[in-house]
Amino acid sequence: MKTFFHLLQEVIKPGLCHRCGGCVSLCTSVNYGALEIGEDGRPRYKDVEKCIECGLCHAVCPEIDELEPETRHRLSWSAPIGRVLSAGVARASDAAVRAHATDGGLVTALLLHLFHTGRIDGAIVAKRVGPYQREPYLATSPEEIMESRGFFFDTSHNVAGLGDAYMARASVEAMSPLMSKGLRRVALVGTPCQIQAFRRMETLGVVPSESVAFCFGLYCSGNFLFDEPHRLELARAGNFSWDQVVKMNVKEFFQVHLQDGTVRHLDLHVLDRLKRHACRYCEDYSAEVADISFGGLGAPEGWTSFITRTPKGRAAYLDARGRTVEEMDRHQDPGLSDKVLEAVMRAAARKRAEAREHRRELGKAVVVAL
Ligand SMILES: Cc1cc2nc3c(=O)[nH]c(=O)nc-3n(C[C@H](O)[C@H](O)[C@H](O)COP(=O)(O)OP(=O)(O)OC[C@H]3O[C@@H](n4cnc5c(N)ncnc54)[C@H](O)[C@@H]3O)c2cc1C
Ligand code: SF4
Ligand code: SF4
Ligand code: SF4
């Protein structure tokens, strides 16, 4: 039986840990309490004596392929980007939701709809908890769901906090409080690696996966660490200064929105050196096993593109459409959903090819974890 000890050797020490928090969430939820998230965001032993060597943490790790075939089969996954029931472009109907959203506020609008119609009683999101940090967060009211949208920042805050705005924190880890709070139906919002860890828990049928009613995945090019030297490099490349920046976004380009309303578009490769090490080996761009996947790619500014993947996800979207969600008029652009899918397939193929190349190189190189 492989345990966390093997995760340390196979995943964490070689720098392949996505910091999704799945292993810790599982060990905590089943009340073994052997693991915790360390200050660097990676899992570690909290009390090795408590480990009963059940092997569950090893099985749910997205870097471990053991449960992958069964998980994909269960979710009717198909190449090249997973199951697709529908695709399109939409945004929150309410301008107040859109105002501080990352793209069109579609994720928040859907969460609010599910909450108001009694289909969820909470949502695992990410919330800024200070100028430097975003943390996984269990939102249990419409106000808390609203607060967690987007990642606008107050320019009075230190710009170093920008990096954390794009850091995927251990959202799956936030599932543990579900048990103590007795919530039975929550939505999980996360990056593809977080969604994968959750789906593996579901395949195993272990707590707290039964409490998650909806899985909302975000497209993901990577997770970036904006340290001082890299920030200077980016500012030079984009000809801007950080005190002018009001928002950043990753779509076809890395976009930097400035106070004067202009937007700098930088090639995504400028972010390569800022990318978290494990992200270089990640093959999932579009959260292929989510109920619905979301991103800015393929959508005009101020809108979110989406792919529904399960009947449950599609039904939730259709139910919210015309209420909290406004869909872009398909008559104006009948090829819109094809364009979204083409853009996502291109980005996904690029990410997969790069990840495979990096894995091949891994055999030759010594890996240094960031
Ligand atoms: C690390 C990362 C990389 C991304 N890369 C791309 C990309 O390459 N291309 C692309 O098109 N889109 C990418 N996205 C998705 C995009 O930034 C938006 O999240 C998406 O378009 C939804 O926008 P929205 O306005 O509908 O969401 P909003 O209504 O603003 O809601 C966003 C929701 O996501 C939650 N959230 C934010 N950050 C995290 C996080 N790190 N972990 C878990 N939940 C989080 C928020 O709490 C909120 O609930 C990325 C997102 C992240 C977090
Ligand atoms: S008790 Fe099980 S889940 Fe917890 S660390 Fe040990 S093997 Fe992993
Ligand atoms: S389950 Fe997630 S946090 Fe745990 S070792 Fe694997 S990638 Fe890292
Ligand atoms: S690229 Fe995105 S999905 Fe992949 S490991 Fe990094 S944060 Fe997770």
Image: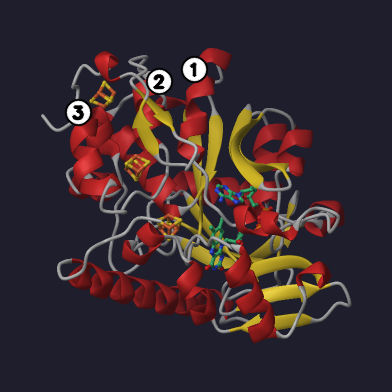
Asked if 248 appears above or below 268 in the picture, the reply is above
Residue 348 falls in which quadrant of the image?
Answer: bottom left
* Circle 1: residue type: Met
* Circle 2: residue type: Ser
Question: Residues at badges 3 and 1 in contact (C-beta under 8 Å)?
Answer: no
Q: Nearer the viewer, mark 3 or mark 1?
A: 3
Q: Which mark is residue 55?
A: 3
Question: Residues at badges 2 and 3 in contact (C-beta under 8 Å)?
Answer: no
At 38% from the left and 61% from the top, the residue drawn is 277
Q: CA distance from mark 2 to mark 1?
A: 7 Å
Specify the quadrant that holds the N terminus. Answer: top left
Work out whether residue 83 can be spotted.
no
Q: CA distance from mark 2 to mark 3?
A: 14 Å
Q: Quadrant of ligand 2?
A: top left
Q: Nearer the viewer, residue 58 or 216?
A: 58
Instruction: State the SS at label 1.
Output: helix
Question: Residues at badges 2 and 1 in contact (C-beta under 8 Å)?
Answer: yes
Specify the quadrant that holds the C terminus. Answer: bottom left
Q: Earlier in the sequence, mark 2 or mark 3?
A: 2
Image location of residue 87, percent across then percent down: 52, 66
Residue 297 falls in which quadrant of the image?
Answer: bottom right
Question: Is the CB of the residue bearing disc 3 within 8 angstroms of ligand 2?
Answer: yes
Asked if 68 appears above or below 248 in the picture, the reply is above
Image location of residue 305, percent across then percent down: 59, 66
Q: Nearer the viewer, residue 87 or 266?
A: 266
At 25% from the left and 19% from the top, the residue drawn is 51
Image location of residue 70, percent across then percent down: 20, 44
Q: Which mark is residue 179?
A: 1
Asked if 310 appears above or below 214 in the picture, the reply is below
Q: CA distance from mark 3 to mark 1?
A: 21 Å
Q: Which residue is under mark 2?
A: 29
